[in-house]
Amino acid sequence: MMSATKADRSIQNTLIWALGRMRDKGYVVRSSVTLSVDPRLAIMGYARKKGQGHSIVISEWALDSEMLGGLVLHELAHIYFTEQGAHSHDGEILEEILDGMREREGLRTKETEYLTDCFNHLQNILVDDVVFDVMEDREREMAGRFFSEWVSDRPSGDPMLNAAMICRNAFAMASLKRRNLFDAESEMFYKNQKFLSTLGDQAECEYQWIENFLVRASSRWKVEEYRLALGAYFEKILSLMRISSKMRDLR
């Protein structure tokens, strides 16, 4: 096992490497950034504002992942987007749209949670444009294998969760299609087909809309374009959650 001192030196070197890789491609992160490990963290990692700078926190188990460098690049891309004032990283816009849906649609707490998860997919696919631009060919292939593990092939018994899983599968597939890395004969394609086939034709149609949306999503949308796009995305996912629930109730 690596000593605490060596582990700390290793992650700091990873941060320095990632910042340099970003800078070399023209994505300069101007804030101070710290990187730390949380042994209790269940997800791989996240970035957050910390005073005048930013902090990246990663899980202890992520230290052993071949995707550690990609993870740090991904979180730095989030910081870069925040510094650039990207609409996708403006929390006020997100809350305004969710508040409007709560008023019009009577969003439930669980629906809001799943919509937020789906928002994260949109945010992530945009920042990963930077990550894939920074990566080398070998690293892109590694990322492709990583995304293939995101695809579910078995629906749950919960219609709301199924809608969120449709969105997650669409994110994984769109991530590769967006960068011309998708293999139509890959295992992830067949896993997704199996998943959709158990949910019916309507689910497959809605899935296709969501995947196409994520493939075409743009960080260059003007603010009103972004609002309209995010609103349409949320409405599509909410409709899928509720149609699925009604179909279950009729059985």
Image (tube, helix red, strand yellow):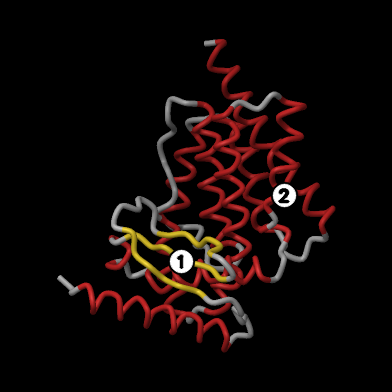
Quadrant position of residue 208: top right
Q: Residue at x 63, y 62 (%)?
A: 126
Vertical position of residue 2 compared to residue 164: above or below: below
Mark 2 nearby-residue class (10 Å; few <14, some 14–19, many ≥20): few
**Foreground: 113 or 233?**
113
What SS does tag 2 mark? helix
Residue occupying the far bottom of the picture: 24
Circle 1 is placed at which residue position?
A: 56
Mark 1 nearby-residue class (10 Å; few <14, some 14–19, many ≥20): many
| 12 to the left or right of 18 | left
Residue 246 screen position, x and y as percent: 60, 17
Q: Residue at x 52, y 26 (%)?
A: 159
Vertical position of residue 60 compared to residue 156: above or below: below
Q: Amino acid at mark 1?
A: Ile
| 5 to the left or right of 202 | left
Q: Earlier in the sequence, mark 2 or mark 1?
A: 1
Vertical position of residue 134 compared to residue 194: above or below: below
In the rendered view of the protein, which quadrant contains the N terminus? bottom left
What SS does tag 1 mark? strand
Residue occupying the far left of the picture: 1
**Foreground: 55 or 190?**
55
Circle 2 is placed at which residue position?
A: 92
Q: Amino acid at mark 2?
A: Glu
